[in-house]
Amino acid sequence: MPDEQIVKTERDGRVGVVLMNRPEKLNALSSSLLGAVAEAMEEFERDAEIRAIVLGGGERAFAAGADIEQLDESTPMSLASRGPLGGWGRIAQVRKPIVAAVSGYALGGGCELAMLCDLVVAAESAQFGQPEINLGIIPGAGGTQRLPLAVGKALAMDMVLTGRRLTAREALQAGLVARVVADEAWLEEAKKVAAEIAAKSPVATQIAKDSVNQAFEAPLALGLQYERQAFALSRTSEDSAEGLRAFLEKRQADFKGR
């Protein structure tokens, strides 16, 4: 596993947990931290026993933004030469469902990292925002692209152009967050959601994740075609046959991931 000083990992049944651990920097997203997160997720991706992943930070911050010191030392060429944004691209390639557990600040890159996950469970104390405009720059890891898809153009423009922050409840109402929970329950509730996902067929959850993402990446007609093909593919799995039999026999399904 990656350096325990900046990322902590644990297994909770069929759920892999990845916790960013730079509390002195409010989990500022340095390239080393993103790389460690990506490495931890990739290890859980390879583990057949793990069916869902939780990504979290600490009570004060999920991640308060990019590592400003590192960003200040960067050049346009160094930023442009990172290919698919290094760790960002690797995290985006993870096929298992990812639940973001957000407490405190999720700002700038932290908000973008939460949006890179499949759903967000937020503490009441959570705050979401893209304050890059205050530094004379713009979001650079999905904030101008994923945020409008999540909350709509008007609110995204407000957040990107003014640096406005959303409370957890505002983020829930806007569609950025799936669930809001008590401050002390942010991590445990995220684990419960992930465990609920992990109890389903891993074949179906991964196909479902891919299919929902198509809604944001392709025109409707192509997305519907993809969905029909993905549905037919899911029906070929042993898990599909088991799920249907279990329903008819009025028992709990025993999904094997095949």
Image (cartoon, helix red, strand yellow):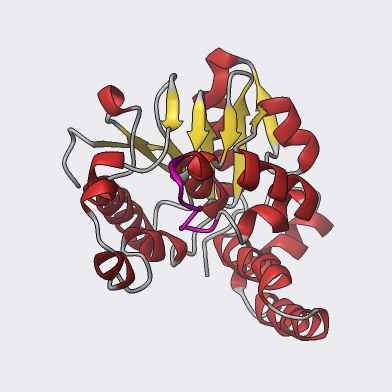
Residue 43 % position (x, y): 29, 56
Q: Nearer the viewer, residue 163 or 170?
A: 163
* Magenta: main secondary structure: loop
Q: In the rendered image, is residue 14 in sight?
A: no
Residue 151 % position (x, y): 74, 48
When the figure is inspected, residue 134 is found, relative to residue 145, above or below; the finding is above
Q: How many marks?
A: 0
Residue 231 % position (x, y): 73, 77
| Residue drawn at x 70%, y 65% as measured from the top left | 212
| Residue drawn at x 83%, y 58% as measured from the top left | 248
Q: Which residues are magenta?
A: 135-142
Q: Give yes or no for residue 140 being in the magenta stretch.
A: yes
Q: In the rendered image, is residue 124 in sight?
A: yes
Q: Is residue 124 left or right of residue 141?
A: right
Q: Nearer the viewer, residue 208 or 81?
A: 81
Q: Is residue 101 left or right of residue 217?
A: left
Q: Is residue 174 left or right of residue 111?
A: right
| Residue drawn at x 61%, y 75% as measured from the top left | 237
When the figure is inspected, residue 216 is found, relative to residue 168, above or below; the finding is below
